[in-house]
Structure formats: structure tokens, C-alpha cells
Image (cartoon, rainbow, N blue to C red):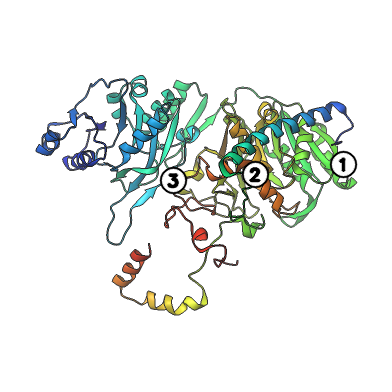
Amino acid sequence: MTSGAHCSVRQLRKTANSLRESSIVPNHWIISESSLDHERVTRTRKMRTSSIVIARSDVVVIEHAVVVFLRAGDELSQNALALIDQKLTEQPGIDFIYGDSSHGRPSRFEEVTNVRRPGWSPERLRSHNYVGELVAVRARVAASAGGATFLSKLHSHDRSLRLSEHSKNAVRIAEVLCLSTQDRIEPTASLDAVTEHCTRTGINAECSIDENVPVVRVNRHVSRKPKISVIVPTRGTVQDIRGKNIVMAAHAIRSLRNTCTYKNLEIVAVLDNETTQESRNEIVNAGSNLIKVVEYDQEFNFAEKVNLGVVNSDGDYILLLNDDTEFISPDAIETLMGLLEDPEVAMAGPMLLYEDGLIQSAGHILNPIPYDLYRHRSPQHVGAQNMLRVQREVSGVIAACVLIKRSAFLEVGGLCTLFPSNYNDVDFGLKLRDAGYRIVWTPHAQLYHFESKTRSPKLRPFEVASIGKRWRDKLDDDPYFNPHLERYISVWKQNVLGQRSLVDALGPTAPIASK
Amino acid sequence: MALSHDPAVNAKLEELVARDAEFGARAELRVAAKYGKDASMEDYHFSKSFARESQASQQIDWVHQGWLRPVRFAYRHAPRWVRFAVKKAAS
């Protein structure tokens, strides 16, 4: 299905040639809004002798067919239809497919740019059309979304949103399906499309477009203000922050109370035996009438301390808050809470920044070991495909500050106590995903995280062994990663050496830059 | 585990541990079925520490090694077409 509006003969010819050369030749090529000029392409001898039936607007697509929306001028990759067919045969329940795309013309000196897309991420689709221009759907999905002809005339973001509303099972094929003539590789976005989508799906939100990048922010209105239990596990450590020696937990609680506009809070501080009386007093003073102190008398185990705090609280939502944090966004809690309005989303995490303002975490990525995306990059950086500007699904978020539904926390058994220090958040995220929930990260809520100022950051061998024993299959197959990307790094970057990263290729003896 | 003196709290904690074990057992079975029971994580490149300077992306800086200086010099002063040919062959 191609829209012929504002499309030159040359563009249409490119698309036509790619269809003829496809390993599976399509039965029909429907060109909506075609003009007389286009007959110079459709009436050629090559097209007439091919098996493709060319149709124009107002065509009723048969129910079991698959409709592929292809932009005029873009070329279908030779094996794209074969890959789509294979996917649909393997998994008949699938009704929405998208894939990677290739941009620019290969020349003697320059390679094409491949846009590698993450797996199905409905929250991200509300921000921009990250699925790209080429989308394949079952005909019944296209029919229920308004008809293929109608959809072909829409902005690609609008089309993808409408199709996603009627689709039950969407997947990504991690192969180049489309060779695009567009040099611009960033996804497009349409504010009107998102606003209408929110109205149609009953999302009570205010939509606005970013001033600098084509990205729509969907700021959900929180329908109610339930009690949130803030769990602060701490030893009462005193540390130097911006030249001042302060009790970290008291500082975090003060920042929560003074910066955040959300007030229905209950603060549970889980203190160790070794916490000094001065620190205790300061923490209690910071929390004032909201604080509840819980004593922890075992050897340090972060997961156990969090679980103890949670069972001693009764809010509908749980905010895990490390003692080495400081709020930046006043509406951080409302933003996170808005994301949890979606019944499928169980956990939402904010953008965490280091003391010097660089990114500490923009969500986890498993490639194949857990990395924090864009760690140590500037927050001014928009990320590949503007990914640092959009709310999107991730495999996990750092437990330094996350908002969780209590029901989901209890359902998956809280944080695993087998991970006393590291990876308990990774394990928790994977348990939530295993239970069918989604985890969303947002750049619109920001905190400072003075990471590991209060504990040793060493990764222990048994933690590595335990995470592998439980989740090796998930580590190898992160749906929000793309197998064609460079592994073992914290940025979204095409792997130029093929499937193997440089570390894989050269081995662990590869010289690593010392800083 | 005797974390709290309150039996109700202890019961809730034990319930959490039991739920976690259920998820863990199911996940472990799946991993064992895919990779075998004795599969280890040795072939994965875990960074040694979560310290700020080492957990960031590991930059592999092979270009600036000492022995590569003359090669780099020659490359940079080679004609344009040679540089492009080298780049093309390398990628």
C-alpha cells in the first residue's frame, strides 16, 4: 500500500522496481491518490508482464491478506516479504510487524546508515514513530483501524498509532526491511496524532511537542493521589556532597519533602544497628511526622532492607529511594505515577544524573550484561533516534529511585535477597517482565544520584553466577536491544563488525583505555 | 531469618521469599533447559566493578598505542584515495 500523493514518477518507479525484485512478489500493489502521471510507472511493459496487480483507491482488502505500508520512493528490501511471511507463519498470532531500515545511498566512500529499532514499545510509540515508515499488518487490523486506503493517506505516526490500537501482538524483525531515500533517520512525530490517540484510548493526558526534537510528551494527569510509601534503606552515612558533610538519608528525605509537590507520603527509614544516634536524630527530624523508623539487625543486604521496609508500610504505591539521591524535578512523582496509570506498567523510573550533571542512568539495557544506557554522557545529548527524550519501555531501571505498584511488588516476591548488593534491581525488573508487566523509563522526572557513595561498588562473583543462573536467556535476548548493535557498551551504536563486538573479536586482552 | 520481632512482619517477609523462589525456580528451569545445567557465565565480559570510572562504556583505544604511531602517521599523510581504500577494506 503506497500513497501516491505528492510523489514523483521517479520515486514511484524505485518502489515499483523493488516490488518486482522482491523474493516474494506481492499479489497487489495499491496506490492511493495516484495521478495520471503515475501510469508511466504502472503501465510499463515490465509491470504489466509481472504478476503484481495494480489497484487504486477504495480497494477492499481480503481478510487473510497482509497489508504492507510502504512510502513512495522507499524500496522494499529483497527478502523483506519473505521475512514477514516467515514470522507470520511461525507465530500466527502476530498482527503487526515492523523492522529496521536503511537510509542514504551507498557510495564508494560512504556506507548506508542502518536504523536499528528496539522491540515493541507502546509507550515510546506515543512519543514518536519509532517503528518507521514500513509497517506490515494483518488486513483485519487495517480494516478495523479505518481501512488501508484511509490509513495510507495519514501521517506515518498517526497510522502507526491507529494500527497499534487494533493490534494484539506486535513484533519487530531485527533485519533491514526497507531501503529509505530519506536522509533523516530520526523518527517523526505528530502532536495531533498523539492527542487524537489519547482521546480514542481514554488516556487523560496533556500532550506537547518538544521544542528541539520531533518528540511528543504525553503528560498523564494522575486521576487520584493515593498514599505512597517511600522506602529509604540507610546506614545513616555521613558524606561530602558539594563540599558539605551531610547525613545522606536526611538530605534525600529533605529534598523529597521540599522539592516534590506530591504530599501524600509515608516515609519508612530502614536503619542499621550501626547507625549513630546523631544520624538517627537528623533522619527523624528530616522526616518529621511522616517518618517511621524500622530497625534492621542483620548483615548488610539491600534487598532484605527494602523488603523489610515494604512490609512495614501500607501505601498503594512504593517509592524505593536510596539515601544518596536528591530530587531535581518538582513533579517527578506525579510523572512516574502517571505512567503507572497504565494497568500493564508496574514500575517507572526517572533519569538519574551524577553530581556533576552527567547521566548516570537512562534505563537498563542488557547487551548481554546489564548496562546503564548513556552513562557518563551529557543530558543535553538526545541519544540515538532521540531515545533520551522519550518515555520508553526498558528491561529494568536502577532501584535508586523507582515507583512500583505494591500489588506487583508483592506478586513477584519483592527484591531477591540472593543479591545483597548488586543486581537486585535487574533481577526485580526481569521478574516483573516475566509476570507480564512492562517497565517504563522517563526523561521528564530527574534526580541526582550520588552513586555508591554509601557502599562498596564491587561486583561479586556469586552475584554474576546467580544472575546468569536465573536470567541468562533474558540477558541474551533483551527485547529493547537490537542484535545488530554493539554489545558491552552503554550507547546505542550499530555494530560495524557484524554480530561480534570488538571485545568479542579481540578477546579480553584487548587494550582498554585508562582514564 | 529473624529480622523482626513481630511475627506478622516475619510471615510477610517469608511469603515474599517464597514468591521470589517460585519465580527463580521457574526461570532457572528455563535457563537450564536452554543452556544446560552446568552452564556458566565465564564467557561473558563482566566489568570488575561498578565504580564510576569503570562501569561506563569500555572504550577500546587501540589507535593511540605507541607502536601504532608510525603507522598512523603514514596513514594520515597518505593520499585521499589510499585512506578511503584502507577504510573500505577495513570495514
Q: Which residue is mark 3?
A: A385
Where residue A297 is drawn, which disc sits there?
A: 1
> Does label 1 or label 2 sit earlier along the sequence?
1
Cβ atoms at labels 1 and 2 below 8 Å apart:
no
The amino acid type found where label 3 is placed reads Gln
**Circle 3 — which element?**
helix
Is disc 1 surrounded by few (<14), some (14 to 19) or many (20+) residues within 10 Å?
A: some
In the visual, does B2 lie left or right of A189? right
Host chain of mark 3? A
Disc on the earlier residue, 1 or 3: 1
Upstream in sequence: badge 3 or badge 2 = 3
The Cα atoms of the two marked residues, 1 and 2, are separated by 29 Å
State yes or no: discs 1 and 3 in contact (Cβ < 8 Å). Answer: no
Residue A469 - label: 2
Chain for disc number 1: A
Which amino acid is tagged 2? Lys
Q: Nearer the viewer, residue B64 or A82?
A: A82
Q: Quadrant of residue A423?
A: top right
Q: Position of residue A223 (x, y in %)?
A: 60, 22
Q: Are marks 3 and 2 on the same chain?
A: yes
Image: A221 above or below A486 = above
Q: Looking at the figure, which quarter contains the C terminus of chain A?
A: bottom right
Regarding mark 2 in the picture, which secondary structure is present there? Answer: helix
Q: Position of residue B13 (x, y in %)?
A: 79, 31
The residue positioned 84% from the left and 39% from the top of the image is A284
Binning the other alpha carbons within 10 Å of mark 3 as few (below 14), some (14 to 19) or many (20 upward) gives some
Element on which disc 1 rests: loop
Q: Which image quadrant: the N terminus of chain A?
A: top left
